Image (cartoon, rainbow, N blue to C red):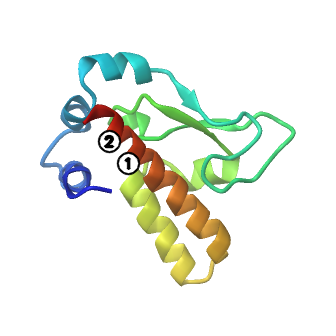
Amino acid sequence: MSEYVRHLFISVENNELTADEAYKILYPTSEKTILKGVVLGNKHKCWYCGSTSTTVMTKDHFWPKSKGGKLMVYCCVRCNTQKGSKTPLQWARYIETHLQKGFISHEKGNRMITATLSLWENLERKIS
């Protein structure tokens, strides 16, 4: 994740910038139209942890809906519940903490962090 994007995350977390302002900076009008309501991933595989299910996954706002998020990913109920209204950076930190405490396996935790940060970096490349 670039320092610029990390700075925007931190600015929103510290209430120095609203999520709507950050969203407008990150997504020019054309990108907002493209990403609004888009759901990424497979309906039977969690975007974050990779678990599979024969039933349809839930939809999670990659950037929390409560903070202006529009882009969604398919994910399992467990990841969606644990992520809650965390921003991608907060979610990655949460996973990292749980990895360090041994609450989740390294394989699963690393997959979750990689899935989160790689999507964010891909979005960043798409708009720059």
Where residue 110 appears, x then y in whole percent? 57, 68
Relative to 14, is 99 above or below?
below
Give the SS element for disc 2.
Answer: helix
Where residue 97 appears, x then y in whole percent? 48, 75
Q: Is label 2 in contact with label 1 (beta carbons under 8 Å)? A: yes
**Which of 27 and 56 lies nearest the eye of the viewer?**
27
Q: Hey, what amino acid is under mark 1?
A: Glu
Where is mark 2, residue-wise? 124
Give the SS element for disc 1.
Answer: helix
Q: Quadrant of residue 28?
A: top left
Callout 2 environment at 10 Å: few (<14), some (14 to 19), or many (20+)?
some
Say the numbered circle drawn on residue 50: none
- Give the position of the C terminus as an image quadrant: top left
Q: Please say whether residue 104 is visible from this viewpoint.
A: no
Specify whether 19 is left or right of 73: left
Where is mark 1, residue-wise? 121
Q: Residue at x 42, y 34 (%)?
A: 65
Relative to 104, is 126 above or below?
above
> Distance of mark 2 from mark 1, alpha carbons?
5 Å
Callout 1 environment at 10 Å: few (<14), some (14 to 19), or many (20+)?
few
Specify whether 94 is left or right of 33: right
Q: Residue at x 19, y 52 (%)?
A: 4
**Which of 119 and 79 lies nearest the eye of the viewer?**
119
Specify whether 18 is left or right of 79: left
Q: Residue at x 18, y 52 (%)?
A: 11
- Give the position of the N terminus as an image quadrant: bottom left
Relative to 96, is 69 above or below?
above
Q: Quadrant of residue 112?
A: bottom right
Q: Please say whether residue 113 is visible from this viewpoint.
A: yes
